[in-house]
Amino acid sequence: MLDPETTPLSRHSRYTIPLPLVPNKANFPYALSVLPETLATQWDSPSFRPYRDAFPASHRTSPSAFSSHVHDLMAQDVKIPYLKALQGHLWQHGYATGALRCPLFPDVHPSLLRWHAAGIPILIYSSGSVPAQKLLFQYTDSSPGADLRPLISAYFDTVNAGPKTARESYELIARTRGEPVDGWLFLSDNLREVDAAREAGMQSYVVVREGNAELSEEEKRGHTLVSSFEGLMVGV
């Protein structure tokens, strides 16, 4: 599973892996920067209405109330499905015009290519919506072949799988793929996600990347740490 904020899952035989890929979060300020114009020009449009109406009624009484709620949620880093869906919608124009590109750590693209060439399915599991995940992988800053969607087998988010810190979410993903849960390997930079996957019976490693919150010695104990996908062997 892969979270484009981020974590991927790849499965080979009895193994599945989520991988943090993205070194910054430039998309979030972009979403806020285009929100005023979007609300001014699309508030009642058929294309925007589904995103608007997914918000609680008390926060969509007016564009200003809506905008205030969005700012509050993003300031608190709330990962709620209706916000994630809106962010994906706002990012779409940025990607299409070239204003946004998904930056990848240098080892990510070669590793995904290597696993894909070996016949290892790669799955994404993110708190971001599935449409937003697909945008990230379609418009990367990697080359050649910046569109990495052909390498991805499936996408999961908190709507079709559940919360990333809940054991049941990982059990559900394994069932969806028709694989026993004890045959999966999960990689994430979030200790709570790693622990939830382990509770579900998955093998799970902590990915340590530049820009992540530093782990204490106590947090490191009892976990396998991975700093790059370059030498990571999957399915062996």
Image (spheres, rainbow, N blue to C red):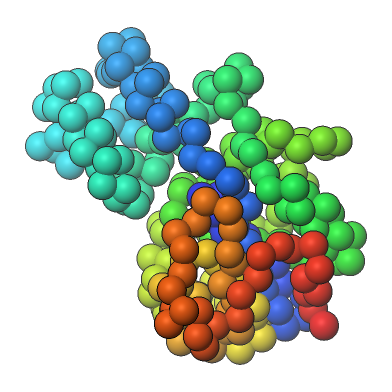
Where residue 118 sits in the image (x, y, percent)? 89, 66
Q: Is residue 163 visible?
A: yes
Q: Residue at x 75, y 47 (%)?
A: 106
Q: Residue at x 61, y 75 (%)?
A: 225
* Foreground of the two, 46 or 171: 171
Where residue 156 sits in the image (x, y, percent)? 53, 59
Q: Quadrant for residue 99, please give it.
A: top right
- 97 in relation to 19, above or below: above
* Foreground of the two, 216 or 188: 216
- 61 in relation to 166, above or below: above
Where residue 124 sits in the image (x, y, percent)? 60, 58
Q: Quadrant for residue 74, please give it.
A: top left
* Foreground of the two, 210 or 204: 210
- 66 in relation to 77, above or below: above
Q: Residue at x 71, y 34 (%)?
A: 141
Q: Spot the residue most to the right.
A: 117
State which quarter of the image contains the C terminus. bottom right
Q: Is residue 42 visible?
A: no
Q: Is residue 67 left or right of residue 62?
A: right
Q: Residue at x 71, y 79 (%)?
A: 15
- 197 in relation to 127, above or below: below
State which quarter of the image contains the N terminus. bottom right
Where residue 193 sits in the image (x, y, percent)? 45, 71
Q: Spot the residue most to the front.
A: 217
Task: Give the mark count.
Answer: 0
Q: Is residue 162 left or right of residue 11?
A: left
